[in-house]
């Protein structure tokens, strides 16, 4: 497969964005060593941009990102793609609404998941951001933001529950907070 | 509304101070992503300086701060104000003694709050700083300092209580510590 | 003992690598003050490269590393070797398959060890990396990577167990994850 | 009181050392805001060097340190001394064997102290460093090192005890570890 010329501008922008988003994973300590990765779908093309395998986070750059098709075959890049490429590709093939995927080893989120437990809605931040379930990421930045927010609320609710029972928010309050926040946050009238 | 010329010097100093205080929030990990903000009242005027909405903390500067009236209407600035502007403005309208407001998602403080529990006074730092209840901030710097101190004591008392019962300080000791500290700390004979 | 000329290239490369690996220990907060160290065997020679004793991590360099024989006798270097040299040397003498040794004071790993408890396999990362027991490090980089991964899983499983029982992975899933990961990770078809 | 000329070289060296040691307190997160301080006795003179009150840690320098007598009276410096100067001075007057004092708000150490509990000796690092009780600091650097080590073991033992009972070390092992470590660590045959 070759890259259609009309995909080039979006693809190059995504190379830079995906490289930069990995810095958020290390900043918020959602990954260690090389054990996590971000990818983005190239909108309108059966292509994705993903981290190279085994390359340290502080050595990533737009140029070092890897482009594959949606079966994980290498299309462009000097490195082998992430060892998790097949899983990212599977999501893009089966869920057209997904534009970005992030794979972390977030300590508190994994701690809840290892017990197969959902996080109760006891903080306004959970209501603001998620309303109910953790949302699907329409693009790579939204996916990373959701991962950062998720770990933060997973940590706070964990710590709260260590010494007693946090009080759940009322359903109508959750709905009201979510509605409000989705309309006023950011420079264009909604979350970005 | 226009800005009275005599408000300009204080307003420009507050733009710089409010921008700089956001760096304390990230330094002490009281916020993630763009989920927190500081504002300051412009003394003697119905104006406030606040963070722009959705702008990353490391991209803030004095110039990018936003000035609104005490109903949250934009008065000066290139960005939309924080999505929390209405809440800050409400405080300034109803509590004239408040000169600064800080909004964080402090992990340990939120963990106590989610259980609707007060933090017992078992550390001399609590006695020194707060005496009893968490004080109102007369200005933005005092508000941020109180938020930093609050999270620190919320964390230490939480950890102490995980393995038993911390011993409360005697009321007369709390009063003595508070009295002493309010008089000797800083370069001018009291906390700043 | 003198250093055979044919050992020089490998030895100088190991000096640089061992110095650099100490930065991973501080980055991941596996050590404090000067309380941890890394060493590497010089392949094919009865020599090892190790940290100098009592020197701060941010003052380490390739030149400051110390070379000893496998009884801990100084062979080359301007400093006394680590106070733990005898223990490293003992391992190299008795376990020829070991090419690198790392000594940390990892908080969560030590917390499990102080209770004389093994960490249950409840996370895919444990299955991917370790399969079962913590592996021996064939070289210094592998040893440091294993220490970083170990602390991460020790922390996550600790936190998960604080509020209930994490669910163990099935043995066949552990085997499958380990097999897959050992073959696809990195730029050369396996972990590095 | 004036400063005897023969005290000048030691005093100037201590100004630089005390300023630098404050960076260890922030690096290891033993303090927040301006809530901690280090001082050093000027050997052979009734003088001490201490942090100025209310000055941020990243604005400290050798020049900004304050010199007082052992009753806390200002002898040299452009700032008021720390609000804790009287407590430091009291220690130097009554305990001639003390050469340095460090005041922190170490989270885990304070958590144990708030319960009025001693930390059991269940880690080799405790045996190596302390043997038994936390030692008095002969100088400011030793005092800061002890504070860093203390917080580390306070944290690890806390975390270990959260999920069960750590196993105490045998008394003869503690004695042996302490003996060994005091003789082999550092560049001069003992801890520095």
Image (cartoon, coloured by chain):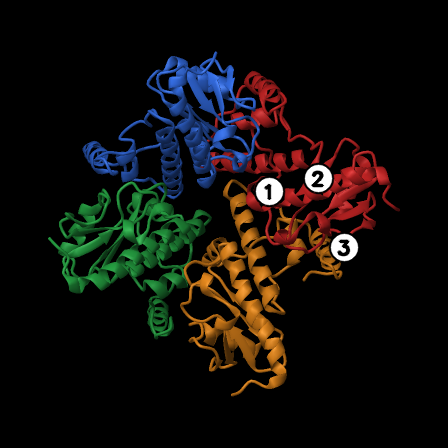
Chain colours: A red, B blue, C orange, D green
Which residue is found at the position 56% from the left and 54% from the top? Answer: C119
Q: Are marks 3 and 2 on the same chain?
A: yes
For marks 3 and 2, give the CA distance.
18 Å
Report the residue that reaches farthest toward the right.
Answer: A1
Is B78 situated above or below A84?
above
Disc 2 element: strand
Task: Indicate the secondary structure of the residue bearing disc 3.
Answer: loop
Give left or right: position of B180 versus B80.
left
- Locate residue D37, reporting x and y percent: 29, 48
Callout in the foreground (3, 2): 3
The answer to which of marks 1 and 3 sits earlier in the sequence is 1
Q: Residue A24 has which mark?
A: 1
Q: Which residue corresponds to mark 3?
A: A80
Q: How crowded is mark 1: few (under 14 residues within 10 Å), some or many (20 or more)?
A: some
- Left or right: B10 as drawn, with respect to A190: left
Q: Do the residues labelled 1 and 3 touch (CB within 8 Å)?
A: no
Mark 1 or mark 2, whichever is nearer to me: 1
**Residue A117 appears left or right of D110:** right
Identity of the residue drawn at 58% across and 18% down: A180
Image mark 3: chain: A
Front-most of C180 and A125?
Answer: A125
Mark 1 lies on a secondary structure that is: helix
A192 versus A41 height, above or below: above
Tell which circle, 3 or 2, labels the residue nearer the N-terminal end: 3
Q: Mark 2 points at which residue?
A: A101
Give the CA separation, mark 1 to mark 3: 22 Å
Residue C52 visible? The answer is: yes
Tell me if D57 is positioned left or right of C59 in this view. left
């Amino acid at each position: 497969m070759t890259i259609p010329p009309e995909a080039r501008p979006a693809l190059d922008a995504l190379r830079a964005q995906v490289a930069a988003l990995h810095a958020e994973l290390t900043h918020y300590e959602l990954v260690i060593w090389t054990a996590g990765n971000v990818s983005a779908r190239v909108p309108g093309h059966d292509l994705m941009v993903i981290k190279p395998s085994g390359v340290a986070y502080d050595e990533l750059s737009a140029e070092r990102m890897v482009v594959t098709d949606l079966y994980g075959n290498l299309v462009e890049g000097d490195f082998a793609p992430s060892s998790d490429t097949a899983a990212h590709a599977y999501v893009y093939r089966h869920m057209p609404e997904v534009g970005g995927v992030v794979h972390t080893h977030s300590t508190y989120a994994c701690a809840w998941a290892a017990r197969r437990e959902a996080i109760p809605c006891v903080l306004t931040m959970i209501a603001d951001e998620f309303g109910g379930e953790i949302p699907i990421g329409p693009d790579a930045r939204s996916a990373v933001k959701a991962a950062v927010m998720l770990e933060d609320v997973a940590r706070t609710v964990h710590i709260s529950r260590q010494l007693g029972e946090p009080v759940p928010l009322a359903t109508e309050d959750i709905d009201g907070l979510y509605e409000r926040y989705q309309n006023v946050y950011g420079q264009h009238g909604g979350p970005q």
